[in-house]
Image: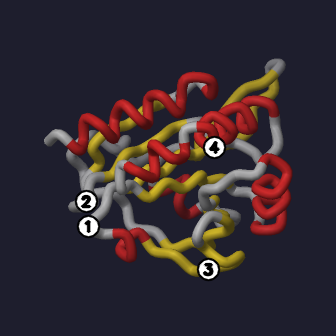
Amino acid sequence: MTTPLQIGDKAPSFSSTAVGGEYCSGTPLKLSDLKGSPVVLYFYPKDDTPGCTTQACGIRDTWREIKASGAHLFGVSIDPVKSHEKFIGKFDLPFPLLSDSEKTIVEAYGVWVEKSMYGKKYMGTERTTFIIDSKAKIAAIFPKVKPVEHAELVLKALKELSTQ
């Protein structure tokens, strides 16, 4: 097992496929492409499920403020590109989602974990958000974030980051 990421650690690099927002469907994206700007990576379990929809719609509703901070924001799940396209369209999400069907990003960030539901154990994505500063260092981590308060936590963290 790897050591969990901590504030101040270098953010693990990644390569993925971006869907939505300013990205055409299937656009390749690397963390290094975003160096010089803050990045928000919010990991969520599954497209179009109650908690994940609440979380995504909260971000959608505060999108102007998040975008005004100069940060790049990406939702990350293991769902395929087609699922992301439907999710974005159904809820009019203005920000991009990253498809991590190979589970390389969720594993690198330590959010692919054993979960339990009704006594059954399974592997899944733990709802966690990472704020990465302009130098690709982790500036904030929100583990097991509650979908309803997620967007406000992100905004507050981005405001704090801009004053540093």
- The residue shown at (37%, 41%) is 4
The answer to which of 145 and 125 lies nearer the viewer is 145
Q: CA distance from mark 2 to mark 4?
A: 23 Å
Q: Amino acid at mark 3?
A: Thr
Direction from residue 35 to residue 62 in the image, left or right: right
Q: From the viewer's perspective, is the residue at label 3 or at label 4 nearer?
A: 4
The relative height of residue 104 versus residue 150 in the rendered view (above or below) is below
Question: Disc 1, disc 2: CB below 8 Å?
Answer: yes
Q: Give the mark nearest the N terminus, 3 or 4.
A: 3
In the drawing, what numbered circle is on residue 60? 4
Q: Quadrant of residue 139?
A: top left
C-alpha separation, residue under disc 3 versus residue under disc 4: 21 Å
Nearer-the-camera pick, 2 or 26: 26
Disc 2 residue type? Ser
**Separation (CA) of disc 1 from disc 4:** 24 Å
Indicate left or right for 19 with 8 as reference: right
Q: Amino acid at mark 4?
A: Arg
Residue, x 64% and y 55% (percent of image)? 94
Q: Say if 51 sits above or below 11 in the image.
A: above
**Residue placed under numbered mark 1 in the picture:** 36
Tag of residue 134: 2
Q: Secondary structure at mark 1?
A: loop
Residue receiving disc 3: 27
Element type at mark 3? strand
Quadrant that contains the C terminus: top left
Left or right: residue 24 compared with residue 104:
right
Q: Earlier in the sequence, mark 3 or mark 2?
A: 3
Q: Check contact, mark 2 vs mark 4: CB within 8 A.
A: no
Q: Marks 1 and 4: CB-CB under 8 Å?
A: no
Q: Earlier in the sequence, mark 3 or mark 1?
A: 3
Q: Residue at x 44, y 29 (%)?
A: 153
